[in-house]
Image: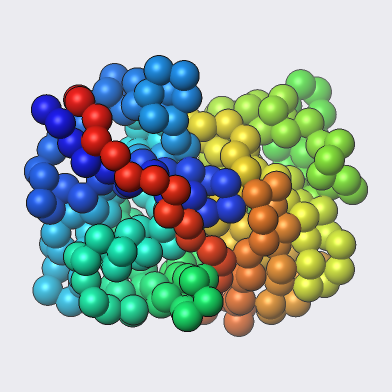
Amino acid sequence: MLISFAKMQGLGNDFMVVDTISQPIYFNEAQIRRLADRHYGIGFDQLLLVEAPQQPDVDFHYRIFNADGKEVEQCGNGARCLAKFVKMMGLTWKYKLRISTLKGVISSRMHKDGNVTVEMGVPVLSPQRIPMRYAEQNTEYSVETHGIRHKVGALSLGNPHCVMTVEDVSRASVDDWGSAICQHNIFPEQVNVGFMQVVERNHIKLRVYERGVGETLACGTGACAAAAIGQLQDKLDKRVKVQLPGGRLTIDWEGDGQPLYMTGPAEFVFEGQIEL
């Protein structure tokens, strides 16, 4: 079967985006892993599927699959790319959208400068709902790996995140610590791991180890998680510039109980067809 797709990226976090409204199709895990391979396939961090709305008050539904073929709940950079994709492909005339995901409804707004703002929802702070195996909610938790005790903040934005503060992200052991913490039994569904360097109260540097992918050039939900955890720990202000290896995002958060807003670029790379 020949399918059409677009390749898109947000700060280097790259996606294969498929319109399954006009070409209904099912992908199994093996097919996704093959397509994600950067030598034998298209190459991407996540596969995004655009589907018809499942609720009367939303414009689209979308599904997210990591490079290992596993479905995940949320992707911030993917949400921006999806908003640009549906407009570019003529699937909508709107600049403001409501989009449902596996974990709820988000909204997006395209700006004239090409940036996209996405409302990422209210962070979930309860350990049981992140989920993580801690009885009491706190701004900081202890996780031990390889005999080293790490202090992390944790929350969920539809997908689980933990964030640790480091002195210099360029020297952080992202692969080793990220992999160990991601698979730690304290996180029953694994976790995305952020390494945050606080430059100023309105500026951080961040690297993220994503479950099912490894370190990526950018992670939108990871940037939101870092900004929120930094604010909860009284390290950051309400508006934070997040410098990732692939570029910069701006995160706005008014505090506990309020939704997070993420603003950044979404770029079309190319479109094509591939035999599945």
Specify the quadrant that holds the N terminus.
Answer: top left
The front one of 12 and 166 is 12
What residue is drawn where x is 82% and y is 72%? 201
In the rendered image of this protein, does residue 164 appear above or below residue 69?
A: below
* Image-quadrant location for residue 198: bottom right
The front one of 276 and 161 is 276
x and y percent of residue 189 in the render? 45, 36
What residue is drawn where x is 46% and y is 19%? 39
- The answer to whether residue 238 shows anywhere in this view is yes
Question: In the figure, is residue 197 to the left or right of 114?
Answer: right
* Image-quadrant location for residue 225: bottom right
What residue is drawn where x is 14% and y is 59%? 52
In the rendered image of this protein, does residue 6 appear above or below residue 253?
A: above
How many callouts does the rendering have?
0
Question: In the figure, is residue 160 to the left or right of 154?
Answer: left
What residue is drawn where x is 48% and y is 31%? 212
In the rendered image of this protein, does residue 160 appear above or below residue 82?
A: above
x and y percent of residue 185 in the render? 55, 29
* Colour treatment of the image: rainbow
x and y percent of residue 57 in the render? 18, 76
Q: Residue furthest right?
A: 167
- The answer to whether residue 233 shows anywhere in this view is no
Specify the quadrant that holds the C terminus.
Answer: top left
x and y percent of residue 259 in the render? 49, 75
